[in-house]
Image (tube, rainbow, N blue to C red):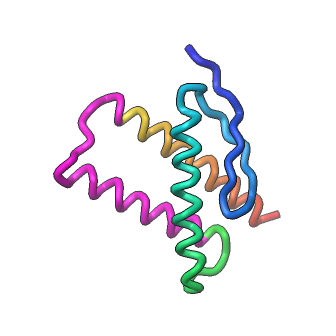
Amino acid sequence: MNRPNTVSVDILDKEYQVACPPDEEQALASAARYLDQHMRDIRSTGKVIGLERVAIMAALNISHELLALKGGDNPIETNEDQQRLSALNSQLDEVLYKLRQLEIN
């Protein structure tokens, strides 16, 4: 079994250290870029203020996209896909938690 590596990801110009299995590093980097872009898009509207609120709105948008995929023409069917999405979701949860901790400090 592969031991997790610590990977640095940048989200809204802040660096976060995230534990990640070696074979998932590219997926994590891609997820971080995707989240960063969603958060930048939301922040640029000027309608949502505060890092935590921007993160929550991005998470809601991404969750909506995921649910639409599950119920759409391309349902997620394989166990491998489910495991990968679960791992990415856990990593996103960790990043959101760290964002919240930074906002509190």
User: What secondary structure prevails in the magenta region?
Assistant: helix
Q: Would you say 35 lies left or right of 13 here? A: left
Which residue is outermost to the top?
Answer: 1
Question: Residue 104 lies in magenta, yes or no?
Answer: no
Q: Above or below — where is 53 with respect to 27?
A: below
Range of magenta residues? 53-81
Q: Would you say 77 lies left or right of 60 here? A: left
Q: Quadrant of residue 36?
A: bottom right
Q: Quadrant of residue 62?
A: bottom left
Image location (x, y in percent) of residue 88? 50, 42
Image location (x, y in percent) of residue 95? 63, 51
Q: Residue at x 59, y 72 (%)?
A: 53
Q: Residue at x 54, y 74 (%)?
A: 42
Question: Residue 56 lies in magenta, yes or no?
Answer: yes
Q: Above or below — where is 27 with respect to 100?
A: above
Q: Residue at x 58, y 51 (%)?
A: 32
Q: Quadrant of the C terminus?
A: bottom right
Number of marks in picture? 0
Q: Nearer the viewer, residue 79 or 73?
A: 73
Image location (x, y in percent) of residue 25? 58, 34
Q: Quadrant of the N terminus?
A: top right
Q: Quadrant of residue 5?
A: top right
Q: Would you say 39 lies left or right of 84 here? A: right
Which residue is outermost to the left?
Answer: 73
Which residue is outermost to the bottom?
Answer: 47
